Image (cartoon, helix red, strand yellow):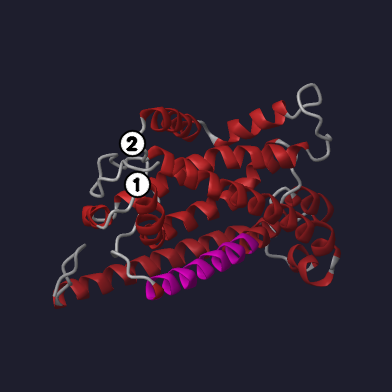
Amino acid sequence: MTSVLYDTPGPKAKARNWIYSGIFVVLFGLVLWWMLSLMGEKGQLDADKWSPFVTDSRVWTTYLIPGLMETLKAGALSMVIALPLGALLGIGRLSDHAWVRGPVGAWVEFFRAIPVLMLMLFGNALMAPRFLDVPSDTRPFWAVVTGLVLYNSAVIAEIVRAGVLSLPRGQTDAAKAIGMRKGQTMFYVLIPQAVTAMLPALVSQLVVILKDTALGGALLGFAELLSTNRQISANYSNTIATLFVIALIYIVVNFALTTFASWLEGRLRKSTKGTGAVVAGDVAEVDAGGAAGVGEAP
């Protein structure tokens, strides 16, 4: 029995896989033991380094929870703006009108090529008092949102384009055969079917948005989750423990996001008849002449 991606392993291959897995587990255990030993020698495993997260509620109410709220607020606002903007840009890239396709393509390629941190710095400089009347205490927040929206809307545009191009050409031909116009074909036939193909890549990008808020805390003074490490470490002298707890919070939040997206994807696949195509997270090399043949949006 085989699948599209690989041949089903036989008895010898299964045995080798078990051996490789065992070797990996042993090596991982040894590395973990070595790291814990070093931490123990440096006093990083002492109870006083970890107890504040259990015994002192101020660690959470003063630092971690407010920082998490700022992270979620910036991430959620960036997602709300970047998703529809990226969808519109992706549809624009599929237009058969050069006056639409050209400028949209230039916009997407320009902002996809610039590091998101540079866009945040640009947003922070643009929102200085001499350009926009943004209070200094909220300037880092809006600079982070600006950078995240500009970069991720360009990436989402490519995800949308790849999702539509992943559909079989017959979908477009069938819509034309029953007299549907270009816009109707895109919004009533292609986009609904492409959503399930795009969802895994979209969720990956939403996780990236959430994590990239930490860049604003590192260089712009944005009071997000990771930046609370400095205050907690200064008060409790437990840098390693603080970073470990913050990492766990990121894992829990992102796991909740991906779990919800997986549930939503399952519901969508049950409620609609998709093509089974899935768009990869990295769509930088998507071929503009893909299988769908739908360079025909309004």
Q: Between residue 261 and residue 53, name the one nearer to us.
A: 261
Q: Is the C terminus in the top left, top right, bottom left or bottom right quadrant? A: top left
Q: Which amino acid does label 1 sit on?
A: Lys
Is 17 colored magenta in this rendering? Answer: no
Q: Which stretch appears magenta?
A: 249-270
Is 250 colored magenta in this rendering? Answer: yes
Q: Where is residue 42 in the image (x, y as percent from the top left)?
A: 67, 56
Q: Where is residue 250 in the image (x, y as percent from the top left)?
A: 61, 60
Between circles 1 and 2, the one closer to the viewer is 1
Query: In the rendered image, which residue does mark 2 sit on?
Result: 96
Q: What residue type is labelled 2?
A: Asp
Q: Please tell me the numbered disc located at residue 182.
A: 1
Q: Is the residue marked by circle 2 packed among few (<14), some (14-19), or many (20+) residues within 10 Å?
A: some
Q: Between residue 283 and residue 102, name the one nearer to us.
A: 102
Q: Position of residue 224 (x, y in %)?
A: 72, 50
Q: In this view, does 216 lie above or below 276?
A: above
Q: In this view, does 72 lie above or below 118?
A: below
Residue at left 50%, top 66%?
261
Give the number of marks. 2
Q: Is the residue marked by circle 1 packed among few (<14), some (14-19), or many (20+) residues within 10 Å?
A: some
* 1 and 2 marks in contact (CB < 8 Å): yes
Chain-order first, disc 1 or disc 2: 2
Q: Is the N terminus in the top left, top right, bottom left or bottom right quadrant? A: bottom left
Q: Determine the image quadrant of residue 283.
A: top left
Main SS of the magenta segment?
A: helix
Q: How far apart are marks 1 and 2 (CA)?
A: 10 Å
